[in-house]
Each structure stands twice: as structure tokens, then as C-alpha cells.
Amino acid sequence: MPPVTPPPIHRMRLRRMGIDTYQEPVVYMRTDCGVCRSEGFQAQSRVEVHLNGNHVIATLNTVEADFLAPDEAGLSESAWRLLQAKPGDEVALRHPAPLESLGHLRAKVYGRRLTAQAASAVINDIAAGHYSDLQLAAFVTACAGDRLDMDETVALTRAMINAGDRMHWGEGLVMDKHCVGGLPGNRTTMIIVPIVAACGLRMPKTSSRAITSPAGTADTMETVAPVDLDVPSIRRVVERTGGCIVWGGAVRLSPADDILIRVERPLDLDSQGQLVASILSKKAAAGATHVLIDMPVGPTAKVRSPPEADILSRQLVTVGHALGLKLRVMRTDGQAPVGRGIGPSLEARDVMAVLRGDAGAPADLKMRALELAGELLEFGGAAPGGTGLATATAVLADGRAWRKFQEICEAQGGMREPPQAAYRQIIEATRSGTVTAIDNRRLARIAKLAGAPKIPCAGIDLHVRTGDFVERGQPLFTLHADSPGTLAYATEYALTQSDTIHVVEDN
């Protein structure tokens, strides 16, 4: 058999385009350049780009203009960072090797099951950055809905764990908690971690940024302390304080999940099987032994009904057991937002008010955090059965939780005040009556239109709760934004959604 001829390598001068392509590496070349003509490269072709021992597989965008010379290759900001490029560098370009795992992806699209081998092949290529965003979107869509059975979900979860690093904490319990999501303002983790750590349990919390919500725990924590810590720094913080609240994407814990989240966010898609794999792969990779799942259930939450909660709970417990995790699911009220703030800075304000014991702290956020913390304390043996809530309440009331939170912030790099928005707009009630329902999804959308979570100070300050009586013209919520244009855009949409906060006139 004759030897295989390697693909030809072409060299071109680099140019930084300054284009944000949402983390997808993109290379730009002129349609009439020699490389495109000789290699048959067209728009959306995949191109392997090498520079000084680094390489990326980038998506090609072709241009028909003179701002690129025929011997120049432009790079998006993402590709520039990954290659650690400098002005004047010369890169080598060639066709990438064929991706065998795409066969497994196509099979899944046509309804075939993912075997453990297939899941591993796909996830390894995703983690290595070999999939374009189009291919990632195809995989996310192929797995959406109920298209992953239990065995496939276990295989996908294991593949996601094995594709990254794992943290090991030695002997003893390692506590963790995760909220399924869909409930704006439900920022209990930042209260729970210091309570649990103050009681002597380890809780190294690695959190995600927002996927489809106006804020994730990492987004909110970042307004008060650094969260982009590497593994040695995380270990140092936990050894010193017993806990941490950091961004999991800063370390290679289930890196394929971070890449999939990048595509799920603009698609506004959360597959149930992928949701389970996402949650539990991160928990196992972070070294957790005991995991508490907060599952809000409500008509406009992510989990909308008790039957849906039953199915998801069974999936989480079954997959967790297969991974060797001890796991409990705690169902909570998902009828309406928690606290007052929706958006990173506004949610951080509420969290700090609870921890400091301020008189005006949101009572619902406080109670929810205490109930979850109490369950974790009993789960981890730090409180006898039935006494967890009382123990957690005492730790919060006497200031131990606030002191522990400050200690964690300092260990992570220093505590700071959350930023405040320069522009605000009050949305008023159009009629008098009783607030009978609050639409979590619409409220979250309005907060995102105001700029959250990308703009930390943006979001919504909620002034009413379900059951409140409001007069016509009374403030329902205040929009926060960092520019007049963004504020006007969010306000215009909010005014068209009159039933976001449903007010029923009294007879």
C-alpha cells in the first residue's frame, strides 16, 4: 500500500481583524487568493491554522475586497487569542484531517442511538475544538427533547468528564449544589456556600455563567470578587476557607460542556439529556461526593410541572448513581422570581443584604437559601436530621456566614462593590388590582434586553410580589441599563408585555 501523502501546507501573513465571532475561531481569506484557488477552499470550509506550536481549526469566511492582501489571512479575536498571535506572524494553513466522529453525529440526526464509543468520539472532538458552530448546533439539536435515552445520557456524561481534567480532594466529603434554573433572582448559592463552609464541610463550588438566563452564579459572584481561578488557586482558596465560588469555565472541568453551552445560549435550547450531562459532568469533574439539586417547579420555570419534575429527578438520580455520586433532589417553588434583583449586580446586592442581615433583605431569598443549606448540612452529617434549618439559621444570624463569605472573597482575590447602572426606567401598573402571577420567562427576557448578563449592572429591580395589591401608576419594576439606547429598547418591549406581571382588577 503506497504511503499517504500529507496535505500541502501553505503560509500566509497574519492580520488581526478585530472581529468578535462569539468564541468561534474564524479565518478570513480573499476569494481570489492562491490558497483558496489551489485548495478549493470556500466560505464555511474548515481550515487548520498552525503558529509556533499552537493550532486551531477555524471556519473560513471569504472576502471580495482589498482590505486583505492576496497573501494575508485575517483572524477573528477568538482565533488570535488561541494561537497567541502577534502582528507580523506567518501562519501555516492546510486542510484538517477528516472527522470520523461526524459519522456518529449524522447517525444521531437520523435517529440512531449514541453508543459509549460514539459519545466519546464526538465529545473528544468537540473538546478539542474540531467542530464548527454549525456542527455543534446540529449535535445540540439532534439530542434535544427526549432524543437521549438513559444509557445515552450516562455515556454522554462520562464522555464529558473524561474529555477534561478532574479535581481530587482526598478523603472526606465534598459537598455541591446546583439549581436546574429558570427562576430569575434565585441566587442562593452565594449564601449557601459560606453557611456550609462555616459548619466545617468542604464546598468547592464551580458555577456556570448564564446560558438562557439574565445571570448565572459566576456572573453574579464576579461583581463582588474574581471568579476566573485556575486549579491551584481554587485548591488554595478551599484549603484556606473551606469553600469557593468560582467560574468552572476557567478550568478544564468538562470543557466540551462549555463549548456546547456557547451554542445552546443563542439557540435558547436546553435538552433534558444534555442538561443532566452538563450538571453531573461538572459535579463529578469538580470532585463532589454529595450533590443537592434545587429543582424549582412552576408554569414559567424551566421545569413546568410535577410530572416533568418526576422524569428529570429520576434521570438525575439514575445518572448520578451510575457515576458514584450521592445525590438528592429538592423541589422548590418556581411560581415567581426570588428576591428583587434580576441581573448580576442587582442579584449580588440582594445576596449581600441577606448575608449582612440587613432589615430590608429579601425574605424569600433568605428562606430558600436557609432551607437548601439546612438540607446540605444534614446530607453531609454536619447537623442531625431535622435540625439543618435551625443550624443554618443560627450561622446566618450570628454573622458567621457573612464573615466566611468575606473570607472567601478575599482569598479569591479581593472583595469589591457591585457596579450600578447609570440609566433607569420605571415600569408602572396600567390598572389597579391584585398581582396574581409573574411570568418568569418574560421578565428574564426583558432583563436580557436591558443588557444582562453581559452588562453586569443591567437588569430589573422588582417592586411587587404575587398577592400584592397595586394601584394604577404604581411602580411594578425598574429597568437598569448602561446606555440610553439599550434602556429605550428594553422599555419598548416591556411596555408591549402587559401580562408579564398579571394584575387582576378587584370586583
Image: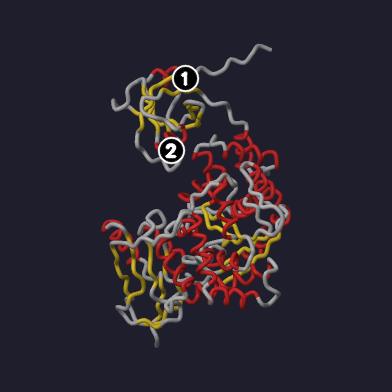
User: Could you tell whether 85 is left or right of 315 in the image?
Assistant: left
User: Could you tell whether 341 is left or right of 253 in the image?
Assistant: left
Number of marks in the image? 2
Residue 266, image x, y percentages: 45, 49
Residue extending farthest to the left is: 484
* Quadrant occupied by the C terminus: bottom left
Residue 235 appearing in the image:
yes
- Mark 1 and 2 residues: CB-CB less than 8 Å, in contact? no
Q: Residue at x 50, y 75 (%)?
A: 364
User: Could you tell whether 315 is left or right of 135 in the image?
Assistant: right
Scheme of image coloration:
secondary structure
Q: Earlier in the sequence, mark 1 or mark 2?
A: 1
Residue 329, image x, y percentages: 65, 65
Read off the residue under disc 1.
Answer: 39
Q: Is residue 413 above or below residue 292?
A: above
Crowdedness near tag 2: few (<14), some (14–19) or many (≥20) residues, C-alpha within 10 Å = many
Q: In this view, does 462 lie above or below 256?
A: below
Q: Is mark 1 on a helix, strand or loop?
A: helix
State the CA–CA distance, disc 1 to disc 2.
Answer: 24 Å
Residue 54, image x, y percentages: 50, 29
- Amino acid type at mark 2: Ser
Q: Which residue is drawn at 47% across and 35% down?
A: 82
Crowdedness near tag 1: few (<14), some (14–19) or many (≥20) residues, C-alpha within 10 Å = few
Q: What element carries label 2?
A: helix
Q: Residue at x 68, y 67 (%)?
A: 379
Residue 466, which numbered label? none
- Amino acid type at mark 1: Glu
Residue 323, image x, y percentages: 71, 52
Q: Residue at x 67, y 43 (%)?
A: 114
Read off the residue under disc 2.
Answer: 78
